[in-house]
Image (cartoon, coloured by chain):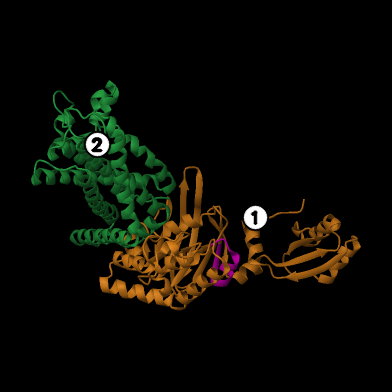
Chain colours: A green, B orange
């Protein structure tokens, strides 16, 4: 706002306004329980498609149940949906004038990006819970106890939060929900080009490098390790797969360092 | 013009090679409605965006209630409301939830935000739809909700950027009534529109803009008087169009506009025209007129005249 507002009050308003925007997300979920159903359908389809259709022909390295191998991959996939969810959401607000309304109001300037990503954390927790439920139903479970499992879920949410900033930035840049919708299909190959569904060993060399360094792979490897699920990497593997927890934290930190300031600057920049 | 609450001086804004504003001046007295009238691409929206602190001018400056829109944008935002060409609300929420959310974002207390939402819904006839999702609203209801949302803080200045574009006549009438009510309470309104009847009905003063500049300002009557009366001629035989046009050009000194297959219209600058003389001239040229009528110009004609988008008879 203006120089007249002391920093502490400004910070408080950023927080309060951000919370109001989180409340907006809750209101939408309440109005549209269908969104929750959609969240249920997606993992169900993925579990059936991969767990039972493709999985019947995939051999897990080191042995083990494919569905137990698959679930950490699906957790990663759901985590990465944050990018496209938020790209579309922010682009809708930008193209319908909602963003302009926010900007013409005397509200805290960084509340919109912070509130939007905060609200996505809520959606993320919910969709992760649904996914975990689906996993338990098909026989997946964590084997190494509560603490490592909690650590895995925490990692998932940390990376999701970092990714949501990428989504906000893309949405602010694209500004058009039609274009944002067209970006959505790009998301699938990105998550598939990883160790989420199949081991990367069988891929051609150049593709394998991409897959090994894909943050999806790091998150999947970290979850497998912390849940004690089959397919945890062994032997001579790329650094992110040998140190998956550190790799996820580094990825998250890097994304936040780049995209938080970028998103806030882009939001506050005056447009046409 | 005592105490103008909106002042713009020499506003310029370019996007690449496109000069959207080329030195726009505007002054709106407190408590009045200023209609900014112009064709598509004239710079109306760019001007509103600068005044509403959404965009900075390349040159020139503007003040709202004495505060500079660039240097004191935060202060300006507390005294303006903006309703645009969209329904800038969350379509997935109910009308009531939208107003409460925006009330909170305007930093009203929770209780105050709820009270204000109910008050506005009641006053603008949206109470029946208050608990329905906006996605199910008609176009007119959405636009009314959009307008109402911009009123939460009781703004001193309300910017309405083509508030009735695409609405049916009844919904337009409802928006007009709402605007009149606000003005009666002292709100200053700056309204952009392409609809001349809208400006004619609502605006105290009109600024006709084109190519990023103000072409003329004045009350609707002043603008009409400035371009003089019009003469409409309806011909018995469309074949007589060309000789009739020649006669009218000679009498009025400008090319007449073809307003139909068998009719012409021409501006009569200044006074001193006698209807009888014109009829006689037409008769002498062998033109059979079914109707010859002298009248005040419509705002449409003022607009076309000023923005130089005529359609002369060829």
Per the image, label 1 sits on a secondary structure element best described as loop
Whether A243 is drawn above or below B55: the answer is above
- Judge left or right: residue B43 versus residue A215: right
- Judge left or right: residue B50 versus residue A14: right
The residue segment tinted magenta is B193-207
State how far apart marks 1 and 2 are (Cα): 61 Å
- Which of the 4 image quadrants contains residue A198? top left
Tell whether position A200 is magenta. no
The chain holding disc 2 is A
Q: Which mark is residue B257?
A: none
Please report the residue visible at 24 percent of the width from the left and 58 percent of the height from the top: A14
Please report the residue visible at 34 percent of the width from the left and 67 percent of the height from the top: B97
- Which of the 4 image quadrants contains residue A3? bottom left
Q: Nearer the viewer, residue A30 or B147?
A: A30
Whether B199 is drawn above or below A151: the answer is below
The chain holding disc 1 is B
Which x, y percent locates residue B80? 38, 66
Whether A132 is drawn above or below B142: the answer is above
Task: State the count of labels.
Answer: 2
Q: Is residue A254 visible?
A: no
Please report the residue visible at 34 percent of the width from the left and 74 percent of the height from the top: B116
Q: According to the image, label 2 marks what residue?
A: A216
Q: Nearer the viewer, residue B285 or B177?
A: B177
Q: Is residue A256 visible?
A: yes
Q: Which mark is residue B308?
A: 1
Task: Tell if the residue under mark 1 belongs to the same chain as the one under mark 2.
Answer: no
Which x, y percent locates residue B115? 31, 75
Which x, y percent locates residue A233? 16, 29
Please report the residue visible at 12 percent of the width from the left and 37 percent of the height from the top: A228
Per the image, label 2 sits on a secondary structure element best described as helix
Q: How many C-alpha atoms fall within 10 Å of the one at disc 2: few (<14), some, or many (≥20)? A: many
């Amino acid at each position: 706002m203006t120089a007249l507002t002391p920093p502490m009050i400004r910070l408080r308003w950023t927080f309060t306004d951000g919370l109001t925007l989180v409340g907006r997300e809750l209101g939408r979920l309440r109005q549209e329980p269908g969104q929750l159903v959609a969240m249920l359908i997606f993992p169900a389809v993925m579990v059936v498609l991969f767990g039972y259709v493709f999985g019947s022909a995939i051999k897990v390295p080191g042995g083990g149940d494919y569905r137990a191998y698959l679930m950490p991959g699906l957790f990663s996939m759901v985590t990465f949906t944050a990018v496209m969810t938020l790209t579309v959401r922010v682009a809708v607000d930008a193209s319908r004038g909602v963003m302009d309304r926010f900007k013409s109001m005397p509200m805290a300037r960084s509340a919109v990006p912070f509130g939007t990503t905060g609200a996505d954390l809520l959606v993320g927790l919910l969709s992760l819970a649904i996914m975990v439920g689906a996993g338990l139903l098909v026989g997946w479970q964590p084997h190494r106890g509560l603490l490592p499992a909690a650590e895995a879920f925490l990692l998932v949410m940390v990376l999701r939060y970092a990714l949501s900033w990428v989504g906000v930035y893309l949405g602010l840049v694209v500004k058009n929900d039609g274009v944002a919708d067209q970006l959505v299909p790009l998301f699938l190959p990105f998550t598939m080009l990883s160790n989420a569904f199949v081991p990367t060993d069988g891929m051609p060399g150049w593709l394998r490098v991409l897959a090994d360094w894909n943050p999806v792979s790091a998150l999947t490897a970290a979850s497998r390790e912390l849940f004690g699920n089959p397919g945890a990497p062994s032997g001579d593997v790329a650094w992110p797969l040998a140190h998956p927890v550190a790799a996820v934290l580094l990825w998250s930190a890097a994304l936040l360092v780049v995209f938080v300031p970028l998103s806030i600057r882009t939001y506050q920049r005056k447009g046409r | 013009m005592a105490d103008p609450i909106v002042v713009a001086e020499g506003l310029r804004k370019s996007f690449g090679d496109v000069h959207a504003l080329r030195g726009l001046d505007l002054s709106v007295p407190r408590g009045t409605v200023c209609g900014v009238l112009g064709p598509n691409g004239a710079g109306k929206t760019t001007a509103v965006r600068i005044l509403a602190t959404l965009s900075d001018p390349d040159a020139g400056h503007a003040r709202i209630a004495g505060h500079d829109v660039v240097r004191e944008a935060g202060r300006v935002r507390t005294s303006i409301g903006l309703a645009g060409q969209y329904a800038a609300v969350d379509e997935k929420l109910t009308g009531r939830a939208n107003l409460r959310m925006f009330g909170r974002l305007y930093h009203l207390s929770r209780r105050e935000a709820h009270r204000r939402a109910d008050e506005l819904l009641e006053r603008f006839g949206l109470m029946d739809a208050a608990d329905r999702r906006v996605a199910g609203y008609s176009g007119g209801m959405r636009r009314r909700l959009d307008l109402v949302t911009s009123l939460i803080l009781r703004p001193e200045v309300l910017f309405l950027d083509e508030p009735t574009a695409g609405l049916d006549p009844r919904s337009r009438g409802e928006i007009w009534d709402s605007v009149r009510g606000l003005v009666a309470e002292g709100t200053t309104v700056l309204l952009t529109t392409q609809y001349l009847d809208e400006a004619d009905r609502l605006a105290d003063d009109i600024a006709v803009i084109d190519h990023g500049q103000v072409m003329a300002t004045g009350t609707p009557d002043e603008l009409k008087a400035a371009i003089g009366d019009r003469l409409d001629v309806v011909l018995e035989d469309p074949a007589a169009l060309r000789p009739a046009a020649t006669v009218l050009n000679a009498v009025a000194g400008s090319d007449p506009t073809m307003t139909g297959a068998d009719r012409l219209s021409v501006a009569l600058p200044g006074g001193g025209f006698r209807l009888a003389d014109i009829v006689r001239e037409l008769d002498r040229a062998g033109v059979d007129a079914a109707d010859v009528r002298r009248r005040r110009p419509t705002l449409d004609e003022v607009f076309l005249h000023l923005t130089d988008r005529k359609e002369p008879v060829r």
